[in-house]
Image (tube, grey):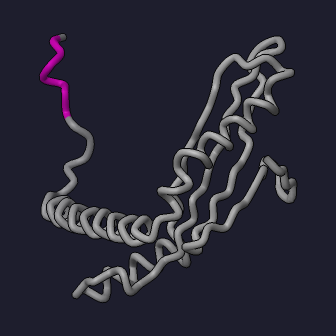
Amino acid sequence: MEKVFTAPGLLLAKKLSNNITVTCFDESKHVAADRWRVKVRFEIQVPLDLEVISAENKGIVAAFIEKNDEHLVQTLYKERHFIPQQDVEKTVSELIDRVFATTLAYFESKRFPVKYIEKAYAEFEENLKHLSETGLEAEDQEDEGPADFSHCFRD
């Protein structure tokens, strides 16, 4: 594993063939004595391709674009607990190597960005519908102030 230290905690950034960027951050912390919690955060940045979204409501698409800007980010964490101090760097390297060996092919596939964008948009649309439904109900009910529980207590 080749380390690149351009930002605090940044270990490595790799651009995949399908234009996805995988960035690794070291979030390890000292726990006790010579023991560490080794934690690596992987950010998978998927460029937002609007051709994937087939929606009739352009307002929802615009809100989705505004919320996510140019890319969607999926975060993956890998961690190990109570690692001796002398093994921290080796453990970080092993975690990165294991993720790259097992999941990099999945992230590099042509289908991953399409399916991920479709899923993120469907979830966003569902959340908007839920908010609009619950928002209408909340507006219909008048706020009566704090609940009165005085009837539960006897003098």
Residue 83: x %, y % from top left? 73, 19
Residue 73: x %, y % from top left? 53, 62
Q: What segment is highlighted magenta in the picture?
A: 148-154
The image quadrant of residue 55 is bottom left
The image quadrant of residue 29 is top right
Q: Is residue 155 left or right of residue 87?
A: left
- Residue 82 versus residue 2 in the image, above or below: above
- Residue 78 versus residue 67 in the image, above or below: above
Based on the picture, tell me whether residue 126 belongs to the magenta stretch.
Answer: no
- Residue 98 versus residue 121 in the image, above or below: above
Q: Give the residue at x 71% y 48%.
A: 25
Based on the picture, tell me whether residue 151 belongs to the magenta stretch.
Answer: yes
- Residue 28 versus residue 154 in the image, above or below: below
Which quadrant would the C terminus be assigned to in this image?
A: top left
Q: Give the residue at x 52% y 49%.
A: 103
Q: Is residue 10 left or right of residue 76?
A: right
Q: Give the residue at x 21% y 54%.
A: 143
Q: How many marks?
A: 0
Q: Relative to the observer, which residue lies in front, 108 or 70?
A: 108
Q: Is residue 87 left or right of residue 48?
A: right
